[in-house]
Image (spheres, helix red, strand yellow):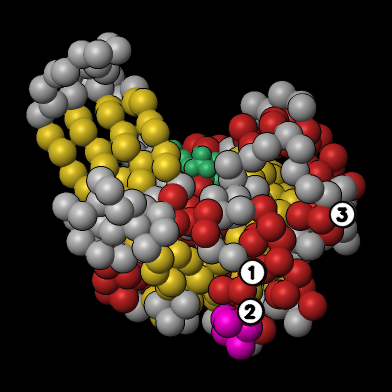
Amino acid sequence: AVVVVGSCMTDLVSLTPRLPKTGETIHGHKFFIGFGGKGANQCVQAARLGARTSMVCKEATGRTGESENQVGKDSFGNDYIENLKQNDISTEFAYQTEDAATGTASIIVNKEGQNIIVIVAGANLLLNTKDLREATDVIRRAKVMICQLEVTPATSLEALTMAHSSGVKTLFNPAPATADLDSRFYTLSDVFCCNESEAEILTGLAVSSPADAGTAALVLLERGCQVVIITLGAEGCVMLSKTEPVPKFIPTEKVKAVDTTGAGDSFVGALAFYLAYYPNLSLEEMLKRSNFIAAVSVQTAGTQSSYPHKKDLPLDLF
Ligand code: ADP
């Protein structure tokens, strides 16, 4: 099974002709609510490939309309848990709180596809080590744990420590990245997977080609991870491991991208699925397949809604 200790965010998306100026009110032409948050996105992709999954996360409880004076009451939390259930994800440890709002990303997108985004992590930041201890059994029995940085670093570190000490493979996605990442994140990562901009922030090096990514991956590997993977958008990814410390570039499919939002999360979720259920595949083969799945996700609009199900994918991926 795959356990994800991470975020759920409700995306509130308005499409507008242009971005409003300070103090200005403009008309948009479309609004929709989407399910996001890196943790949940990755969990949904793993589940859609057939993994048994559990989400350890936190959101608000209650109903919208109560929220202005009582921040822990909004309907997004209940809706999110329903979404996890519909994706066959165990919600036994999807906690609800009255002390903070469900995490939201308020997004405005103009006709050129440029955006402005405000993220309020809210209840995600209240997921704590006591919550993790309650989920001990599900964590210790998993094959793979995925963590990101949209919950507090202390919670992510404790989750990785619990997994590591029970022999659960850890897949860490340092997103959003900060330059001063605690060194324990590297030593607790069996697989450390980030994109180009995260690799730049973490290493201080410019990363815009497979060769650059190989150099950055070496720097990250030396900080103590077993395996480093850097994703390169339409190009694919680069891998490097303690056992084979020579960077290897794994190109992806040439496809017509419609919406690349959440491609990295599709990739990470797919990789967790292969690590958990096909542990005998070579890492290179796992990454080829994860590239393929993420490339499918960029060909339709939306984040989770663009993630493919097993039944829609070629049989030779399984
Ligand atoms: P993020 O979404 O975190 O920015 P990337 O842009 O690096 O991550 O994308 C992650 C993975 O998604 C890539 O390694 C690749 O497999 C796939 N991918 C992303 N964009 C494209 C694209 N335009 N065409 C094909 N595959 C893509």
Between the residue at mark 1 and the residue at mark 2, the CA separation in whole angstroms equals 6 Å
Label 3 sits on what residue type? Gly
Q: Which residue is mark 3?
A: 224
Q: Position of residue 81 (x, y in %)?
A: 32, 70
* Residue displayed at 65% across by 60% down: 156
| Mark 1 and mark 2 residues within 8 Å of each other at the beta carbon | yes
Q: At x 54% / y 63%, what residue is drawn? A: 127
Residue appearing at x 39%, y 51% in the figure: 103
The numbered disc on residue 153 is none
Depth-wise, is mark 2 or mark 3 nearer the camera?
2
Label 2 to label 3: alpha-carbon separation: 26 Å
Disc 1 under 8 Å from ligand 1? The reply is no
Quarter of the rendering containing residue 188: bottom right
Tag 2 and tag 3, C-beta contact below 8 Å: no
Left or right of 212? Residue 126 is left
Q: Residue at x 27, y 71 (%)?
A: 82
Q: Position of residue 29 (x, y in %)?
A: 10, 29
Q: Which residue is mark 2?
A: 133
x, y (%) of residue 318?
48, 75
Stretch in magenta: 134-138
* Label 3: how many Cα within 10 Å (few below 14, some 14–19, many 20+): some
Q: Which residue is mark 1?
A: 129
Q: Residues within 10 Å of mark 1 (few under 14, many from 20)?
A: some
* Nearest to the observer: residue 299 or residue 111: 111
Q: Is residue 148 above or below residue 298?
A: below
